[in-house]
Each structure stands twice: as structure tokens, then as C-alpha cells.
Amino acid sequence: MNNLNDPPNWNIRPNSRDDGGDGSKWNYALLVPMLGLAAFRWIWSRESQKEIEKEREAYRQRTAAFQRDLEAKYHAMISENRRAVAQLSLELEKEQNRTTSYREALIAQGRKLVEEKKLLEQERAQVMQEKRQLQPLRNAYLSCLEKEEDWQRRARLLLKEFESALSERQSIYCSLVLPRRKRLEIEKNLLVRASTDPIAADLEMAAGLTDIFNHDTYCGDVWNTNKRQNGRLMWLYLKYWELIVEMKKFKKVEKAILEE
């Protein structure tokens, strides 16, 4: 290794020892720095290796910690997703069961409505059949009722006439000035009509009139001018005869229908 630009004796010459020069001095002078450089390189390499190993270990630990953290987060996420899936599955099953229950209830309700509709149709058909069967009977009832309405009207008119005559008779009975002869005449006429009038005879009014004439002695006060305040038994008989008229009307209708 010679440098042509160096002054003399600055370069190492291979045969400087043979020439008796100072080549060994240069050899030793170069050896020390080279050894120092080698030692420095060895120490530096060793320290560098230690730093590398240290950094590698730290990196490995960080990587392992990061991996553990990722795995923990992954497992947590998986667990959360599983819980969510389980919850959704449970809710879905509940909804399916609820839907099934609703469907079954609707089906049952529909069947019930169909059955009720059938029953209503059967009842309606039965009612219509009974109506058709009863229609002639109804017509006969209305016809008989219409006929008896005329009898009832005449019977009520008769009772009104008897009420007027009985009121007059009781007023005379309670009077201190009217003659007894007039009262007896009214009683006689009423008994004769009760015996001869068909409606009066049908109501058997003669016996009631006799009872009134013999036992109805009630009168209002002395100054009474209202004929309706005289007598008690007569008013009971008049009400009784009105009820008999109503009852006989329906009995006659019933008899006429049964005889057809």
C-alpha cells in the first residue's frame, strides 16, 4: 500500500527491514490502531447485538401484548355477537310462537264464526218455516180478533150506559129530597136490561146488580155534588165487568181458532 504522493519513508515498504531501515517502526505504528479498531468493532458489534436483541425482545413483547389484546377483543366481540344472536334467536322464537298462537286463535275464531253462522242460518230457516206454518193461524187470529173487536166495543158502550144509570141511582139513594120511587124505577129497568141484553146476560150482570142494590149504601158528604163520590161496590163491579169483557174477547178468539 504505497501512496506516490507521500514523502519518503511514509509508505510501508516490504523490503525495508532488509535494507536495515525503520520499517518495523511503521508496522507497529499501524498495528496498534488496527487492533484498537478491531477491538472497537468487536465491542461495538457486541453492544449492537445486545441492543438489537433488546429491541427484538421488546418488539416481541409488544407484538405478543398486541396480539393478546386483539385476541381478547376478538373473543369479547365473538361473545357479544353470540349473545346478540342468542337474544335475537329468542326474540324470533317468541315472535314465531306469538304468530303461531295468533294464527291458531284466528283459525279457531274463524271456525267458531262459521259454526255460529251455520247455527244462525239453521235457526233462521226454522223461524221462517215456523212463520210459514203459523201464518194461517195468525191470519185466523187477526180475523177472529177483528170480529170480536165489534163485540168488545158494544160491551164497553153497554157498561158506560150502566155506569151512568148506576151513578144516577146512587145519587138518588144518597139524596134527601129525591123520591125513592125514581130510584126503584131505575133499578127495575137495569135488572130488565141485564136479563134481556145478550151482552149483559153473557157478563152475568143481573146478579151483580142485585148485590149492588142490596149492599151499596155508601154516600159522600151531605153537600156532595159529584156523583162519582157516591157508592163503592158499584165501582168495583164496573171494573170487574170491564175485565170480564177483555177476558171473554180473548177466550172467544181462542175458541174460534181451536175450532178451525
Image (cartoon, rainbow, N blue to C red):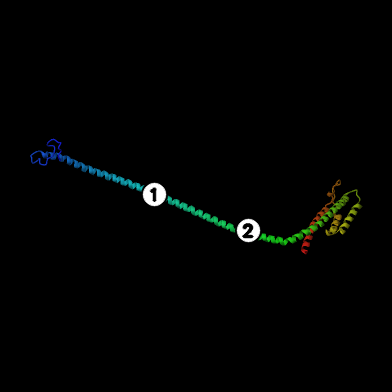
Q: Is residue 248 left or right of residue 119?
A: right
Farthest residue toward the bottom?
259
Q: Is residue 13 left or right of residue 80?
A: left
Q: Residues within 10 Å of mark 2 (few under 14, many from 20)?
A: few
Q: How many marks?
A: 2
- Which badge, 2 or 1, comes first in the chain's sequence? 1
Image position, residue 228 (x, y; %): 83, 49
Compare residues 119 and 160 and report the one nearer the observer.
119
Compare residues 21 and 151 and report the one nearer the observer.
21
Image position, residue 147 (x, y; %): 80, 58
| Residue 99 seen in this snapshot | yes
Compare residues 53 and 118 and report the one nearer the observer.
118
Per the rendering, the mark at residue 74 is 1
Q: Quadrant of residue 186?
A: bottom right
| Residue position for label 2 | 117
Q: Is residue 92 above or below residue 19?
A: below
- Mark 2, secondary structure of its residue: helix
Q: Quadrant of residue 255?
A: bottom right
Q: Residues within 10 Å of mark 1 (few under 14, many from 20)?
A: few
